[in-house]
Amino acid sequence: LQYLWRKGSFVHIEKPEDAQLSMVGNHLLFRLRSDWELEQTWKAGSLLAIDTNAFLEGSRSFDALYSPQPQRSFTDYPVTPSAIIINELDNVRDRYSVARFKEGEWLIEPLDVPGFGRVDINSKNFRYSVL
């Protein structure tokens, strides 16, 4: 995704070439593979969110849903109609968080799952099971 269809035409989304772009609700999500120099430097491995209209109007005031940390690596972010599930490896163990946009801000809470096993996420209804 590098273009959005808006008001009868395609609008180019400026981003680093290697950044992955997706949408949830009215927010653009940027998964960075390299540092992005803007008003501040967003580090490779970050997951950023911004209101689509604000971005198209020139704002670059992102919310960091995930920031890289030592001994941790970002692996995936399944998107559901009501939430983003952030999956990271923390010292080689899966760790999950749930990000939801409520009342004008992103709330990020840990998702309590057992330390070992496989987690399957049903994005349609945001249910998960541990196998």
Image (cartoon, rainbow, N blue to C red):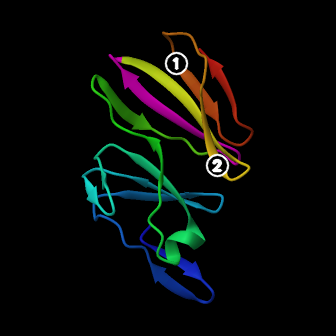
- Residue 126 rendering spot, x and y as whole percentages: 70, 36
Closer-to-camera residue (40/50): 40
- Residue 110 rendering spot, x and y as whole percentages: 58, 24
Direction from residue 40 to residue 30 in the image, left or right: right
Q: Classify 10 Å Cα crowding around label 2: few (below 14), some (14-19), many (20 and above).
A: few
Q: Counting residues from the N terminus, which is met first, the one under dot 2 or under dot 1?
A: 2
Alpha carbon separation for disc pair 2 and 1: 30 Å
Q: Secondary structure at mark 1?
A: loop
Direction from residue 39 to residue 35 in the image, left or right: left
Q: Residue at x 71, y 43 (%)?
A: 124
Q: Which mark is residue 105?
A: 2
Indicate whether 73 appears above or below 93: below
Q: Secondary structure at mark 2?
A: strand
Q: Quadrant of the N terminus?
A: bottom left
Direction from residue 1 to residue 121 in the image, left or right: right
Closer-to-camera residue (30/107): 107
Q: Classify 10 Å Cα crowding around label 1: few (below 14), some (14-19), many (20 and above).
A: few
- Residue 116 rendering spot, x and y as whole percentages: 48, 9
Residue corresponding to mark 1: 118
Q: Amino acid at mark 2?
A: Glu
Chain part drawn in magenta: 80-92
Q: Amino acid at mark 1?
A: Arg
Q: Residue at x 33, y 36 (%)?
A: 68
Indicate whether 11 appears above or below 127: below
> Does 83 appear in magenta?
yes
> Does 22 appear in magenta?
no
Q: Residue pushed farthest front?
A: 39
Q: Nearer the viewer, mark 2 or mark 1?
A: 2
Q: Residue at x 56, y 70 (%)?
A: 54
- Residue 63 rendering spot, x and y as whole percentages: 50, 51
